[in-house]
Amino acid sequence: LFRLIYSCGLRASEAANLKCNHVDFTGGVITIRAGKNGKDRLVPLSDSTAKCMQQYHQRFHDSACKDKYFFKGKYKNKLTRHKIYKWFRICLEAAGIHHLGRGKGPREHDLRHSFCVHSLKKMQEQGRDLYASLPVLSTYIGHASTNATQHYLRLTAEFYPDVMEQVDKKCSGVIPSVEVSTNETH
């Protein structure tokens, strides 16, 4: 579950809502139905992620599971976001990673953020035109616009300043800067 969220940049709710018939092992693609904003989208799987998902499917499902949820919850119902959050906390604890408190992270949604930051870094390293790539990434992860992807650019600036230098050269003006007033209350 967490490998899928990270390797495809999914929202936890999208992974929870995934049904067996949304996974195409032959084509290596999953279909996200009615994601945020009610949008459907196709998401390619890496070979290794597809193989893991196929192994999971063979272990936990029979051939007649087409309309059942891919990741089962208690009593074979759909997983909830709350259960995914609890499992993530268990994984953090087992890995010796301290949780900073509810809403402060690490959170399972941070896997999606990491996917985006790593994708931007990889595009920059490959010499891709970030002006053209940003809308592709935005669509891939199911954002309604590149403005919604702005948060990931802030994360990228923190960890990969060279990516931001390229973005500034190619994309200045695409995402307007926002001036923060010192009088604002957060």
Image: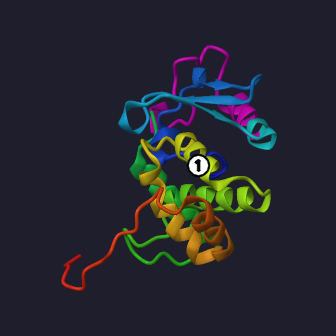
Q: Indicate how the structure is coloured in the image.
A: rainbow
Label 1: how many residues lie within 10 Å, few (<14), some (14-19) or many (20+)?
Answer: many
Q: Which residue is mark 1?
A: 9
In the image, 74: left or right of 56?
Answer: left
Q: Is residue 150 magenta?
A: no
Q: Residue 17: horizontal and vertical position, in percent?
A: 47, 34
Q: Which quarter of the figure has residue 10?
A: top right
Where residue 25 sits in the image (x, y, percent)? 74, 26
Task: Please tell me whether mark 1 sits on a helix, a strand or a loop.
Answer: loop
Query: Hey, what amino acid is under mark 1?
Result: Gly
Which residue is drawn at the image coordinates 53% and 64% (left, top)? 153
In the rendered structure, the answer to whether residue 23 lies left or right of residue 11 reads right
Residue 66 lies in quadrant: top right
Q: Residue at x 52, y 18 (%)?
A: 67
Magenta residues (range): 52-77
> Where 92 falls versus 84 (above or below)?
below
Quadrant assignment for the C terminus: bottom left
Residue farthest to the bottom?
182
